[in-house]
Image (cartoon, rainbow, N blue to C red):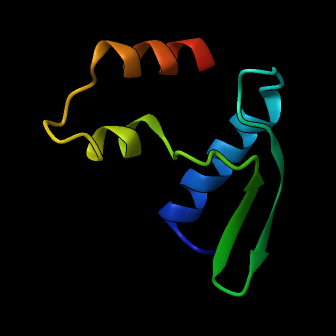
C-alpha cells in the first residue's frame, strides 16, 4: 500500500471517473508504476486557476482573467 497519498489519489480518480462533461477535464485512466500513481487526463496548457494566479504580479485576478476562466468553466 502507498498510504494516505495513494488513498487521496484514488478518491480523486473515483470522482473524476464520474465527471463527463465538455467543461470538465477528461480522465482517461490511471496506472501505478513502481511507487508512482499516474492520472492520465486532458492537458490544461495554462495549468490550474491557482497556477494562473501565481503568475499574476499582484497575486490577484483582473476582470479579464476572471472572465476568461469563468467562460472556460
Residue 25 is situated, as x and y percent measured from the top left of the image, at: 71, 35
Q: Quadrant of the N terminus?
A: bottom right
Q: Would residue 70 appear left or right of 59 to someone viewing this image?
A: right
The quadrant in which the C terminus is found is: top right
- Residue 15 in sight in this render: yes
- Residue found at x 67% / y 69%: 37
Q: Residue furthest left?
A: 58
Which of the two residues, 12 or 70, is positioned nearer the viewer here? 70
> Residue 53 is drawn in which quadrant?
top left
In the orientation shown, which residue stands out farthest toward the front? 64
Q: Nearer the viewer, residue 21 or 19?
A: 21
**Residue drawn at (72%, 21%), measured in percent from left and top?**
23
What is the number of callouts on the image? Answer: 0
Image x and y of residue 43, in percent: 70, 50
The foreground one among 66 and 36 is 66
Residue under the image location 13 percent in, 36 percent down: 58
In this view of the protein, which residue sits in the foreground, 20 or 52? 52
Q: Vertical placement of 23 versus 6: above or below?
A: above
User: Is residue 66 shown above or below 30?
Assistant: above
Can residue 73 be seen at all in this image of the molecule? no
Amino acid at each position: 500500500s502507498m498510504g494516505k497519498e495513494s488513498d487521496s489519489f484514488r478518491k480523486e480518480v473515483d470522482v473524476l471517473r464520474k465527471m463527463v462533461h465538455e467543461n470538465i477535464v477528461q480522465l482517461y485512466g490511471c496506472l501505478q508504476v513502481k511507487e508512482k500513481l499516474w492520472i492520465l487526463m486532458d492537458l490544461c496548457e495554462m495549468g490550474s486557476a491557482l497556477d494562473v494566479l501565481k503568475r499574476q504580479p499582484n497575486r490577484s485576478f483582473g476582470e479579464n482573467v476572471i472572465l476568461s476562466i469563468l467562460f472556460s468553466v
